[in-house]
Amino acid sequence: EKEKAEAFIDSMKAEHEEKLQILRDEASSSSQATLDEKLRAAEEERQSLVAQNDDEKARLKSEYEDKLEAALKKQKQAMELVKKFKTATAEKLKSIEDERAAAQDQFAEEKKVLEKELRDEHETKLRTIQEESQSSREEVLASLTAQLKARDDDHSFA
């Protein structure tokens, strides 16, 4: 009986061990399923984060491109204003230079006219003075000639 009892105990131990192994296998399978589920959830979250990251990158890139486009547009407008300013300045400088050249030409013409008028006036005065001087000489000469003649006549009568 002791052997029967020991055999019974051994069979119970084996059965118990078998049931424990089944429970361990089930627990392991359950743990593996839970682990697989957790891994699947983690992968889905990672993919979601990657998608969010990609969306954020696309949004930031779009914002950057919009800002860059706006900056380039402003730069182009500024360059156009600079061109217009340079053109206007060049035109103004040319206009000023043309006016200065015209004023110099006018001054040179007026100077020539004034010099000619002054020369003509000087020549006229000089002629007048020469004519007056000639006339005075002729009068003095005529007076002296008359006086000499009068003396000669006075000497011839005496």
Image: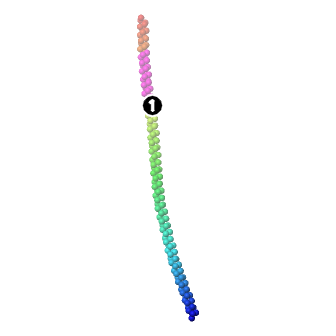
Please identify the residue farthest to the bottom as the structure is shown: 1
Left or right of 157, for residue 46: right
Q: Nearer the viewer, residue 90 or 13?
A: 13
Position in image of residue 76 (x %, y %): 47, 54
Q: Nearer the viewer, residue 50 or 35?
A: 35
Query: Element type at marker 1?
Result: helix
**Magenta stretch containing residue 130, yes or no?**
yes
Kindly identify the residue that appears in the image at 41 percent across and 5 percent down.
Answer: 158
Kindly identify the residue that appears in the image at 43 percent across and 9 percent down.
Answer: 152
Q: Quadrant of residue 129?
A: top left
Q: Is residue 54 above or below residue 138?
A: below
Range covered by the magenta-colored residues: 117-141
Kindly identify the residue that appears in the image at 44 percent across and 24 percent down.
Answer: 126
Q: Which of the colour schemes (rainbow, by chain, secondary structure, one colour) is used?
A: rainbow
Position in image of residue 73 (x %, y %): 46, 56
| Residue that mark 1 sits on | 115
Q: Nearer the viewer, residue 69 or 87?
A: 69
Position in image of residue 149 (x %, y %): 43, 11
Q: Which image quarter holds the N terminus?
A: bottom right
Q: Quadrant of residue 112?
A: top left
Instruction: Give the residue type at disc 1.
Output: Glu
Q: Residues within 10 Å of mark 1 (few under 14, many from 20)?
A: few
Q: Is residue 1 above or below residue 144?
A: below
